[in-house]
C-alpha cells in the first residue's frame, strides 16, 4: 500500500536527494473540472453531465460588432499568427505590446525592459517610506547583437502562455524565453552572432571557467552576475561598461548572484542546464491549480515561488523540493527556490451561497423588513439616470441584493416588484435598446466594449480600452444571476447574453475560434486580478479594489448556481478563493508584517492601489488620509462572501481602529461610514448597529436593508467564519 509522504523542506546545496512520490492521477470516474462559461471556449473539458438547463447553442451569442477608434493596433508587436485569436488586454507583459513597447515588466525576480533590438535586465532594489514603496528599475545588463545595436526594429511577441512570453528580435537572431519565476533569463541565439552586453555600472571583472561556458561578472554596484552558455563563448571587457563576444549560437542563461553568496552560486550551477521555454496553469479539479513548464536541456527545473505559492503548494499531489535558504528579494516578499517540473496549488475552499452562512436572527426580521419595504418602494420612484456601465451595474446589483434578503427574511411580497425592476433595467443592456450606452464586440483584441468606450478612452472608467472589465461585468452578472434565480423563464431567454458577459473575463479555454482571451483579468502567477487594461504604466499592471474582483468571480459562480452549471460554479468559486487569499496576502497589511518595511506597515492597514512593482497608500479617487475610502473600496459590495474576505477578526479590529479617526474629518461620506461600521459589526454588533441606524445615506451599491442584514447575520464574537472551515464541503468529499 502506498504511504503518503508529507512535503519536507530541504536544501539541495548540502543534500541532493529527491523524495519519491507517485504523481496524482484522477480516477476514471472523477468529474472533469472546470468548464468555461461557453462551450466554444473549452478545448479539453466537456460540459456538465447533467445540467438543470440545456447548454447554450453551438454558436455563442456576440454583441453587435464595432470598430473602436481608441484601441491601439496590436499588429505592431504580436506575430501575425497570433492576430487571428483574441489577445490579452491585462497581462503581465502588456507593456511589451503598447506604444513603443519599451516600458519594463516584472517577471520575478527581474524587471525586463525591451527597447528596439535589445533587452535590459534589472534586479531591482526597493524604496520604502510610510506612504508608498516601489521597485527601482536600473539597467543592470543590456543584451543585444553587436551589429544591430542601433536597429530601430521592434521586438515581436511570438508566443505567450499563462506563465511565460517569448520575445523575438528577428534582425538580431535573438529569442528570449521570459518565464515568470525563473532565476535565470534565457536567450536562444539562432545563428552565429556577435553579442554585446552593456551596463550602466562599471565592470570590475569578467572571468571565465576553464570550459568557457560560465562567466562571472562583477560590477561596481556590488552585484555579481553569472552567465552560462550551452557551448564555449569568448566574452571580453571591451570598455569600462561593455562586454562583447565573438560569434556564438546556442543558449545563454543569465542570473544575478544574490549577495554574492557562494552557496547560491552552487545552486545556480547545479540547475543552469535545465531551462523553461513556457509555462501554463492547468485547472485539474475543484480548488486545485497545477503549474506545468515546458523545459529543455537536462537535469531538474529550478523556479521561484512567492509567499502565496508557498502557502498553497500541496505536498500530497506534486513532487517538489523547496530550497528554503535560496531566496531572491521581491516587493511581493521573498521568492524561494522550488525544484520540480510541476506544482499543485490548493487554495482554501470557499462555499458560494446566495444567503448568509449562518442565517439572520429572527428577532431582527421586523427591522430588516421595514427597511426592505422602503428600499423596494424607492426603486420605481428613483429611476436609473446614469449611463455609466460601472454605476449602472452597482445599482442593479443593489436591487438584486434586496430580492435575496427578502428570501432570507421570508418576506416574499416585495419580490415581484424587484423582479419587474430588474427586468426593466437589465434587458435594455442585453438587447441593445438602452439609448445611453450598451455592450458591443471588438474583434481587434477580442472582447466586449461599451458604446461610449468605443469612441472615448476615458468613458466608463476606460472600459473601452479594457480597464476594470471584471468590476463592471461582475455587477451585471450578480443582477442577472439573481433575476435568473427568481424568474427561470427570463433566465433561459437571456442565457446566451449572460454567458457572453461572463466569457469576456472568465474564459479558460484555448480554442483558436474563441471570441475572448483566456482569463482577461486574472493573473495565474500572482493569483489575483489586474484592472489596468490597455494603458502603458511604468509600474506595470495595477488593481485597486480586491473586493470587486472577488465579487466578479463570486457572481459568476452564482450564475452557475442559477443555471445548474457545476463547472461554472467550480471555476468562479476557485478564482474567488484565490483572489481572497491574494488580497489577504498583499492588500491587507498586518501589524508586525515584514514584507513592506517598518514605516509603511506602521502607517497602513490596507494598500490603496497595488501595482506590479509598487504599493501605494493613495487611491485613484482619494488621498491616503481618506482611510475610510481605502477600507470601503476593499470591502464593497457587501455580500455573504465578504465574511470570507475579512475572516481574520483580529485584523478586522486593527483595520477599523486604524480607520475610525478618519471619520471625524469634515465631509466624510455617509456611504463610506457604512462600510466601516459593517466591519465593526463583526466584533461589536450592538455598537455598529446603533451607528448604522443613525446614518443619513448609503453607498450607491448599498442600502440600509443590506447593512441591517449584514449586522443581524453576524455570529457571536470569537465564532466568526473561517475560510474553508465550517461551511465548505469540497475538502470533505475530495
Image (spheres, helix red, strand yellow):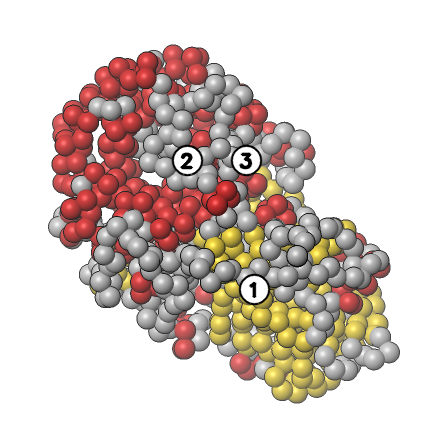
Mark 3 falls on what kind of element?
loop
How many neighbours does mark 1 have within 10 angstroms: few (below 14), some (14-19), or many (20 or more)?
A: some
Residue, disc 2: 641
**Residue 46 vertical placement versus 154 (above, below):** above
Gap in Å between the C-alphas at discs 1 and 2?
31 Å
Q: Position of residue 700 (x, y in %)?
A: 29, 31
Residue 87 visible in the displayed image: no
- Residue 369, picture quadrant: top left
Mark 3 vs mark 2, foreground winner is 2
How many labels sit on residues?
A: 3
Q: Residue 41, labelled with which disc?
A: none
Q: Residue at x 54, y 75 (%)?
A: 168
Q: Position of residue 620 (x, y in %)?
A: 43, 40
Residue, disc 3: 588
How many neighbours does mark 3 have within 10 angstroms: few (below 14), some (14-19), or many (20 or more)?
A: many
Q: Residue at x 63, y 81 (%)?
A: 189
Residue 38 visible in the displayed image: yes
Q: Residue at x 54, y 30 (%)?
A: 648
Question: Which residue reaches farthest front?
Answer: 1
Counting residues from the N terminus, which is met first, the one under dot 3 or under dot 2?
A: 3
- Residue 499, picture quadrant: bottom left
Residue, disc 1: 292
Amino acid at each position: 500500500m502506498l504511504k503518503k509522504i508529507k512535503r519536507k523542506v530541504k536544501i539541495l546545496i548540502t543534500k541532493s536527494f529527491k523524495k519519491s512520490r507517485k504523481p496524482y492521477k484522477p480516477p476514471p470516474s472523477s468529474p472533469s473540472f472546470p468548464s468555461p462559461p461557453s462551450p466554444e471556449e473549452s478545448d479539453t473539458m466537456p460540459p456538465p453531465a447533467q445540467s438543470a438547463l440545456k447548454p447554450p447553442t453551438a454558436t455563442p451569442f456576440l454583441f453587435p460588432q464595432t470598430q473602436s477608434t481608441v484601441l491601439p493596433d496590436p499588429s505592431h508587436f504580436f506575430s501575425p499568427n497570433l492576430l487571428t485569436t483574441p489577445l490579452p488586454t491585462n497581462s503581465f507583459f502588456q507593456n511589451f505590446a503598447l506604444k513603443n513597447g519599451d516600458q519594463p515588466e516584472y517577471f520575478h525576480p527581474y524587471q525586463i525592459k525591451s527597447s528596439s533590438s535589445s533587452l535590459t535586465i534589472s534586479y531591482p532594489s526597493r524604496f520604502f517610506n510610510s506612504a508608498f514603496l516601489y521597485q527601482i528599475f536600473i539597467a543592470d545588463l543590456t543584451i543585444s547583437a553587436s551589429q544591430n545595436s542601433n536597429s530601430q526594429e521592434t521586438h515581436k511577441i511570438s508566443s505567450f502562455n499563462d506563465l511565460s512570453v517569448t520575445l523575438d528580435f528577428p534582425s538580431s537572431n535573438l529569442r528570449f524565453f521570459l518565464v515568470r519565476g525563473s532565476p535565470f533569463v534565457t536567450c536562444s541565439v539562432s545563428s552565429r552572432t556577435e553579442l554585446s552586453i552593456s551596463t550602466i555600472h562599471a565592470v570590475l571583472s569578467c572571468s571565465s571557467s576553464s570550459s568557457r561556458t560560465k562567466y562571472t561578472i562583477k560590477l561596481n554596484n556590488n552585484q555579481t552576475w553569472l552567465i552560462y552558455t550551452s557551448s564555449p563563448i569568448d566574452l571580453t571587457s571591451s570598455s569600462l561598461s561593455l562586454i562583447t563576444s565573438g560569434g556564438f549560437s546556442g543558449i545563454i542563461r543569465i542570473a544575478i548572484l544574490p549577495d554574492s553568496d557562494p552557496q547560491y552560486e552552487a545552486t545556480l550551477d547545479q540547475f543552469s542546464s535545465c531551462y523553461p521555454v513556457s509555462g501554463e496553469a492547468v485547472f485539474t479539479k475543484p480548488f486545485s491549480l497545477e503549474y506545468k513548464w515546458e523545459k529543455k536541456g537536462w537535469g531538474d527545473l529550478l523556479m521561484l515561488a512567492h509567499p502565496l505559492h508557498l502557502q498553497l503548494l500541496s505536498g500530497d499531489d506534486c513532487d517538489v523540493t523547496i530550497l528554503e535558504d535560496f531566496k531572491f528579494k521581491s516587493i511581493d516578499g521573498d521568492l524561494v527556490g522550488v525544484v520540480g517540473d510541476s506544482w499543485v496549488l490548493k487554495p482554501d475552499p470557499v462555499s458560494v451561497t446566495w444567503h448568509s452562512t449562518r442565517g439572520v436572527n429572527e428577532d431582527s426580521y421586523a427591522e430588516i423588513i421595514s427597511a426592505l419595504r422602503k428600499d423596494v418602494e424607492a426603486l420605481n420612484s428613483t429611476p436609473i439616470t446614469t449611463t455609466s456601465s460601472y454605476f449602472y451595474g452597482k445599482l442593479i446589483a443593489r436591487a438584486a441584493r434586496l430580492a435575496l434578503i427578502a428570501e432570507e427574511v421570508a418576506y416574499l411580497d416585495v419580490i415581484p416588484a424587484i423582479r419587474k425592476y430588474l427586468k426593466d433595467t437589465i434587458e435594455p443592456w442585453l438587447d441593445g435598446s438602452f439609448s445611453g450606452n450598451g455592450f458591443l464586440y471588438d474583434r481587434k483584441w477580442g472582447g466586449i466594449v461599451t458604446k461610449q468606450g468605443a469612441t472615448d478612452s476615458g468613458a466608463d472608467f476606460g472600459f473601452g480600452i479594457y480597464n476594470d472589465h471584471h468590476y463592471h461585468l461582475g455587477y451585471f452578472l450578480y443582477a442577472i444571476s439573481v433575476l435568473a434565480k427568481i424568474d427561470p423563464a427570463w433566465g433561459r431567454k437571456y442565457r446566451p447574453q449572460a454567458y457572453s458577459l461572463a466569457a469576456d473575463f472568465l474564459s479558460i479555454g484555448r480554442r483558436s475560434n474563441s471570441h475572448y482571451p483566456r482569463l482577461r483579468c486574472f493573473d495565474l502567477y500572482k493569483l489575483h486580478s489586474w484592472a489596468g487594461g490597455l494603458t502603458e504604466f511604468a509600474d506595470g499592471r495595477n488593481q485597486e479594489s480586491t473586493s470587486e474582483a472577488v465579487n466578479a468571480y463570486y457572481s459568476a459562480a452564482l450564475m452557475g448556481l442559477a443555471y445548474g452549471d457545476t463547472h461554472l460554479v467550480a471555476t468562479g468559486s476557485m478564482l474567488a478563493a484565490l483572489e481572497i487569499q491574494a488580497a489577504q496576502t498583499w492588500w491587507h497589511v498586518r501589524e508586525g508584517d515584514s514584507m513592506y518595511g517598518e514605516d509603511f506597515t506602521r502607517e497602513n492597514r490596507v494598500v490603496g492601489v497595488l501595482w506590479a512593482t509598487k504599493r501605494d497608500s493613495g487611491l485613484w479617487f482619494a488621498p491616503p488620509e481618506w482611510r475610510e475610502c481605502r477600507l470601503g473600496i476593499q470591502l464593497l459590495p457587501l455580500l455573504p462572501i465578504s465574511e470570507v474576505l475579512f475572516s481574520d477578526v483580529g485584523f478586522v479590529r486593527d483595520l477599523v481602529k486604524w480607520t475610525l479617526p478618519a471619520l471625524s474629518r469634515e465631509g466624510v461620506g455617509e456611504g463610506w461610514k457604512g462600510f466601516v461600521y459593517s466591519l465593526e459589526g463583526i466584533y461589536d454588533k450592538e455598537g455598529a448597529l446603533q451607528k448604522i441606524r443613525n446614518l443619513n445615506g448609503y453607498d450607491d451599491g448599498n442600502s440600509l436593508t443590506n447593512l441591517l442584514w449584514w449586522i443581524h447575520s453576524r455570529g457571536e464574537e470569537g465564532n466568526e467564519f473561517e475560510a474553508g472551515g465550517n461551511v465548505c464541503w469540497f475538502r470533505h468529499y475530495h
